[in-house]
Image: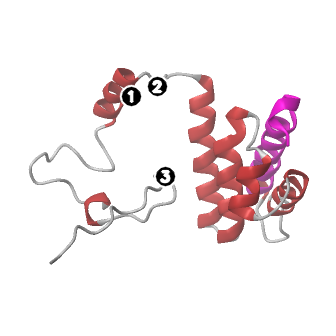
Amino acid sequence: MLENPAPPPRTSPATRTPSAADTSAPCRAHPEHSRIGNRAARRRRAARIGVPTGSPELDWLRQSLRACDLLASVHSVSPSDRALVAFAIEWAPYGGADAEDLFVKFGVQRNRFLHLLQAAMTPRPSDLGHLRNLKATLCSDLLGAWNDTPTHNRK
């Protein structure tokens, strides 16, 4: 007799691999739904669930993630450094991740993570001037956000 298989493990949206439904091809039933485009619909949906679309923190987060993608696309940061920087950006609004999250994701303590972040954002000799400025600004923003944490977040 066949038994029901166990449900798939629950993962966060950031760690799961995209399925065929997640690709950028629009849905045939709802052609207006696609991963890219239709910004107004995304804003309406975000307003319904309570995400502040015009907040400075959200704007900074989006801009910083775009900068991280730019740095990765021009090979100014390695793919592993890009993951580290993106993680730091995502946690910056909260004052950084706690020690447990850092250990699970990267296997390091908080101070080592900040050293790795600084090393990842160190300008390379091949970087153009605007990339150097972008790295320096993003690094100082991240270190400032991660170092201005209340003592109860540090473990």
Residue indicated by mark 1: 46
**Image quadrant of residue 109?**
bottom right
Q: SS of the residue at dot 2?
A: loop
Q: Specify few, some or many for label 2: CA neighbours under 10 Å numbering under 14, 14-19, or 20 or more.
A: few
Residue 120 image label: none
What is the three-letter code of the residue carrying label 3?
A: Ser
User: Which of the two discs, 3 and 2, sits closer to the camera?
Assistant: 3
On the image, numbered disc 3 is attached to which residue?
Answer: 12
- Residue closest to the eye, 53 or 96: 96
* Foreground label between 1 and 3: 3
Between discs 1 and 2, the one toward the N terminus: 1
In the image, which residues are magenta? 131-155
Q: CA distance from mark 1 to mark 2?
A: 5 Å
Q: How is the image coloured?
A: secondary structure
Quadrant (top left/top right/bottom left/bottom right) for the C terminus? top right
Drawn side of residue 85 relative to residue 141, left or right: left
Disc 2 marks a residue whose amino acid type is Val
Give the secondary structure at mark 3.
loop
Q: Mark 2 = which residue?
A: 51
Q: Secondary structure at mark 1?
A: helix
